[in-house]
Image: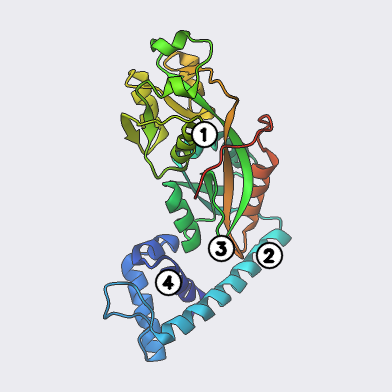
Amino acid sequence: MQIESLKVFRDLVDTQSFSKAAQLNTITQSAVSQQVRAMEERFGMPLIERTSKKFGLTREGAMLYEVSRNVVQLYEGLQHQFQEMRNVISGTIRVATVYSIGLHELPPYLKTFLREFPSVNVHIEYRRSNQVYEDLLQGTVDLGLVAFPLPHKNIKIEPFRKDKLVLISSPTHPLGTSPSITLKAVSQHKFIGFEPDIPTRKAVDKMFRDADCDIKPVMEFDNIETVKRAVEIDAGISIVPRATVEQEVRNGSLKILALEGGDYYRPLGILLRSGRILSPAVKKFLEMLKGHESESPEADPVTMAA
């Protein structure tokens, strides 16, 4: 039995998906099924429960999974050590991140990294925040980038940057002539928000609660690009990370308005699966992200309940 077969089986159990296991191993879904059947024939016993709609393992399958995970981890660790001995930085880095970070925070880092390590392929997956955690735990990505990272017993969190949260409007909005605006005044106007389960939305809601006022968005979206488009057509105002609107502010389609009551920040975090052996390429990428931490002024970031 080849190690590749054990890796396919490990990935299948981690993701509980034949299609994801196929994608991780650059093979077809049919090939995953064939390898599982071949292992069942070799051991003379079923490894996967086929009597239930949910993915499950037999007792023997669970034993094989533990062995597969350990063997593959040792083998991958050996490969990484050989690469480090030869000073080889290559391969693929898989990153899962939310739109606002992937589109507006990550590009300068990617440009610098790929210039230095042209043999590395960085694959970016744009996901909702909760899905980033799931991808990391399933082993389908090497690292994740999220806002307001939440503690998890199987995930290690490294600090990345801090984004300033700013109030934005169209250039013609009535509030645009005010020298500074209170959150209470903001709550009296049409507001464009993120969907309720998005961490930045939860943080913005907390900002208003702390100011003893309430906000009820007239529109809610799941990504920053749609929020910006709605503000540009003067459908309402919004509070967003400053880095995501710099281009629109420069070209005059959006305006940043001064908020009273101090500055608000959202912390960004790098997520790593605890115990996972990192390839030399992932280590270098992580070093670069941590080595270029934002120089934003020190301030207590907006916090929120999990």
Q: Amino acid at mark 4?
A: Val
The answer to which of marks 4 and 3 sits earlier in the sequence is: 4
Secondary structure type for disc 3: loop
Q: How many angstroms separate mark 1 from mark 3 (CA)? A: 32 Å
Query: Is 248 above or below relative to 303?
Result: above
- Residue tagged 4: 13
Q: Which label belongs to residue 210? A: 1
Residue positioned 58% across, 71% down in the render: 73
Residue positioned 55% across, 73% down in the render: 72
Question: Do tag 4 and tag 3 residues touch (Cβ < 8 Å)?
Answer: no
Residue positioned 50% across, 57% down in the render: 136
Secondary structure type for disc 4: helix
Secondary structure type for disc 2: helix
Label 4 Cα crowd, 10 Å radius (few <14 / some 14-19 / many 20+):
many
Q: How many angstroms separate mark 4 from mark 3 (CA)? A: 17 Å
Q: How many angstroms separate mark 4 from mark 2 (CA)? A: 28 Å
Q: Foreground mark, 2 or 1?
A: 1
Label 2 Cα crowd, 10 Å radius (few <14 / some 14-19 / many 20+):
few
- Residue tagged 3: 154
Q: Position of residue 12 (x, y in %)?
A: 41, 70
